[in-house]
Image (cartoon, helix red, strand yellow):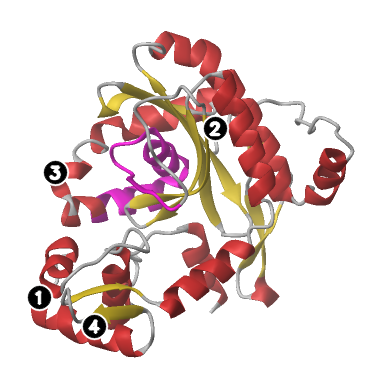
Amino acid sequence: MGRRSERLSRQGMLAGDRAGEGDIIQVVSRAFDVLRCFEGHEARLGNLEISNRCGLPRSTVSRLTHTLTRMGQLVYLPRDQKYRIGPSAVAMSTAMMRGLQLRNLIRLRLQEVAEQLPGTVGFVIPDRFHLVYLEFGRASNALGLSSTTGTRIAMVSTAAGHAYTAALDAEVGDALLAEMEREIPESAKLLRPRLEANRRSLCERGYVVACGLWSPHINGLAVPLWSPQYQTYVVVTIGLLSAMYDEKRLHKEAAPRLLELSAAIGAMLEGGEAELFSDRARGKPLPVPGHNNKIIRTEDTNELEAGTRRPRPARSVRARDGRR
């Protein structure tokens, strides 16, 4: 029990467990695939559209949407003959988001950096082959990116996704890439040739750069952080106009600011939120750890807690032993 829990914890959001894919309950996995098709509360989809999006037979989708509707996860709209996210799903997601107690504080820091550079800065969490914006900040004159809270972005074509996959243990990252190649082979071709270079960049610099990958007009930079709360890597990322920030300027000007931001957020994730909130209330500047590129790691396993990991102090990704 403990060993399996630890393995699931190590792989974070990896959907398939390479060591035991057969023990995943397929109907549950497919139900979540259906729910992932609804990218916003207002999204309205029919069974055929859902079938095309998640690659399931229409008959299977019909049974799943019927069950999810009875559970309140979906609502059927007779006039449109489509479905939309239901009250139970909204209530569940709202309750989960309340668990992120630092959202407002993180949003303030994101906004500060976004206005200084300027650009769109995001705090994202992985969801299978995508990442989802938990919070964001955007300068008033930022162009080209319109991501907001809840926006889903592809791992393979974004700096955030490349940083996330580079931060994973090599075995887990390779397994995730192999799963991508099975299910989204054309997209996975963007990631495969860059994975080792991304790992080196993360180890040497503490961040990953992706220029023109998502759009020829947008260059991105991202820093992954280990989250004890979610037991996976979250990512702080920024998108900037390529006409203003070429790769050289990203390294020189954007990287130091994003590393500083990620260090501050890493300190919050470690559990120093009480002091940070009190400092903000007194109008004091938020403290930033002494080293610019910290990454939250967890090493120790408590066997009595079925593999639950206990956080250790943040550590630079440029560790001498080369570990990330």
* Mark 3 and mark 2: Cα distance apart in space: 31 Å
User: Label 4 belongs to which residue?
Assistant: 64
- The correct choice, above or below, for 191 with respect to 244 in the image is below
Name the mark nearer the viewer: 2 or 4.
4
Predominant secondary structure, magenta span? helix
User: Label 3 belongs to which residue?
Assistant: 186
User: Label 1 belongs to which residue?
Assistant: 57
The part of the image, by quadrant, that contains residue 293 is top right
Kind of element beneath mark 2: loop
Name the mark nearer the viewer: 3 or 1.
1
Q: Would you say residue 182 is visible in this rendering? A: yes
Q: Amino acid at mark 1?
A: Pro
Percent of width and height locating residue 3: 53, 71
* Mark 3 and mark 1: Cα distance apart in space: 22 Å
N-terminal-most mark, 2 or 4: 4
Percent of width and height locating residue 152: 36, 50
Name the mark nearer the viewer: 3 or 4.
4
Which residues are the magenta region? 150-179
Mark identifier at residue 322: 2
N-terminal-most mark, 3 or 2: 3
